Every structure is written in C-alpha cells, then in structure tokens.
Amino acid sequence: MHELSIAQSMIDVILEQLSGQPDGVKVTRVRIAVGQLSGVIPPALQSAFASATQGTAVQGGILEIDERPVRIWCPKCQSEQPALSPQSLRCTTCHTLSQDVRSGRELELLELTLVDPEPAG
C-alpha cells in the first residue's frame, strides 16, 4: 500500500511548514487535492493518514480530500473538456481521443488549519 508512504511524506511536509510556529501548535484539518490519475486511492489514504499522524502535531486532525476529475484538451472542440473516464481520455462532448491531459494527476497540499497552543495557566 503506497498510500502509507504518501501519507508519511505528506506529514513530513506539514511538519516542515510548522517550523517557526509556537510550540504546541496543532493541525486540526488538512485539505488536499487528489486527481483521478494520481494513482492514489482516497479511502486507503484516509486510513494511512490516521496511522502516519500518530505522535505528531497532526494527530487527531481531519484529512479532507478534494477529488479532481480528469480534464483534457479536445482538439476538435478547441477547449478543455472532462474526459469520459480515467480509462477513456475522450471528450465527453464529441468523443474525440486526446492525449493532452490538463488535470487529474494532482496530489497537492491545499490548506492547513492550525490551533494555537493552550496558554499556560
């Protein structure tokens, strides 16, 4: 399951982004984009994320996955169009085959929601 290594790499990137933040800052939400052609299975990534966050500032945080459809450039329509499916890179309007994939390969960190540490009492 390569989703675990993806989740661990994602946590490494998030923790790097937290450097310079006050001690005790927690990540409560992580929002990412995952394209249909990325090779990532969102439910497997959700499961791996929970394991990868153990003992980190992201533990207990929620992973939100924005799934991105495959979009192609259609040479016949002369516009960006959705593909029929990830397996069929044909324009949904005219069914012309295209090899010009414009989106659907994403695996991007979009947003982090942070909570400041509790003030010492």
Image (spheres, rainbow, N blue to C red):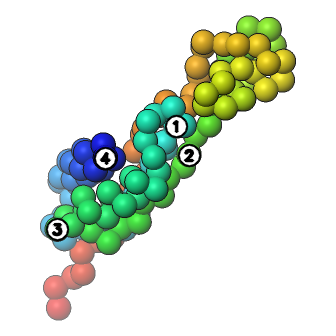
Residues tagged 3 and 4 counted as in contact (Cβ below 8 A): no
Point 48% across, 42% down: residue: 34
Give the structural element (helix, strand or loop) at label 2. Answer: strand
| Residue at mark 3 to residue at mark 4: CA–CA distance | 21 Å
Q: Which amino acid does label 1 sit on?
A: Gly
Point 60% across, 13% down: residue: 100
Point 60% across, 12% down: residue: 99
Residue 1 badge = 4
The relative height of residue 43 versus residue 84 in the rendered view (above or below) is below
Earlier in the chain: of badge 2 and badge 3, it is 3
Give the structural element (helix, strand or loop) at label 4. Answer: loop
The residue beneath circle 2 is 67
Earlier in the chain: of badge 3 and badge 4, it is 4
Q: Which amino acid does label 3 sit on?
A: Gly
| Residue at mark 1 to residue at mark 4: CA–CA distance | 18 Å
Residues tagged 3 and 1 counted as in contact (Cβ below 8 A): no
Earlier in the chain: of badge 1 and badge 4, it is 4
Earlier in the chain: of badge 4 and badge 2, it is 4
As drawn, is 1 to the left or to the right of 102?
left
Looking at the image, is mark 3 or mark 4 nearer the viewer? 4
Residues tagged 4 and 2 counted as in contact (Cβ below 8 A): no
Residues tagged 1 and 2 counted as in contact (Cβ below 8 A): yes
Q: How crowded is mark 4: few (under 14 residues within 10 Å), some or many (20 or more)?
A: few
Residues tagged 1 and 4 counted as in contact (Cβ below 8 A): no
Residue 35 badge = 1
Residue 55 badge = 3
Closest to the observer: 100 or 48? 48
Earlier in the chain: of badge 1 and badge 2, it is 1
| Residue at mark 1 to residue at mark 2: CA–CA distance | 6 Å
Q: Residues within 10 Å of mark 3 (few under 14, many from 20)?
A: few
The relative height of residue 94 versus residue 44 in the rendered view (above or below) is above
